[in-house]
Image: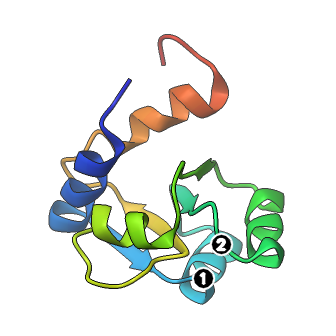
Amino acid sequence: MINVDRALRNSIRTGKVLLGSSQTLNAGISGQAELLIYATDCPPAVSRQLDDLDVPVYSYPSGGRELGSACGKPFSVAALAIIEHGESDIMALLREIRGVENE
């Protein structure tokens, strides 16, 4: 199991990550995103739309304040899109999402 907070910070530092519901939805719809992540308090309409996209989605186990803090931001983040994961191991979440031991 990976440390999601550490992996998120590393992705933001070394890769390309879009923050916010609108940007996350756009990245998911356009197919740019490798992974979508949303907080537990993300608006239900947004989380439903994200879940319906053909992109892996991870439900962060805490609220937007905690997700924002995990990203190293001083504000709440409802959703984010990993465009390029950089040197992060955040894509290991795909194994958890899919329930696969070795990918």
Kindly state the secondary structure of the residue where label 1 is placed. Answer: helix
At label 2, which amino acid type do we have? Cys
Which residue, given by chain and number where applicable, does mark 1 sit on?
A: 21
At label 1, which amino acid type do we have? Ser
Which residue, given by chain and number where applicable, does mark 2 sit on?
A: 42
Q: Quadrant of the N terminus?
A: top left
**On screen, residue 70 above or below 43:** above
Q: Is residue 1 left or right of residue 80?
A: left
- Mark 2 vs 1: CB contact within 8 A: yes
Estimate how packed mark 2 is, as few (under 14), some (14 to 19) or many (20 or more) residues with alpha carbons within 10 Å.
many
For this rendering, which residue is in front, 69 or 38? 69
Q: Is residue 54 left or right of residue 8?
A: right
User: Which quadrant of the figure has residue 19?
Assistant: bottom left
Q: Position of residue 92 (x, y in %)?
A: 41, 32
Which residue lies at the image location 29% right of the left edge and 68% below the top edge? 69
Which residue lies at the image location 15% right of the left edge and 65% below the top edge? 13
**On screen, residue 99 above or below 83:** above
Which residue lies at the image location 41% right of the left edge and 64% below the top edge? 67
Kindly state the secondary structure of the residue where label 2 is placed. Answer: loop
User: Which quadrant of the figure has residue 96?
Assistant: top right
Estimate how packed mark 1 is, as few (under 14), some (14 to 19) or many (20 or more) residues with alpha carbons within 10 Å.
many
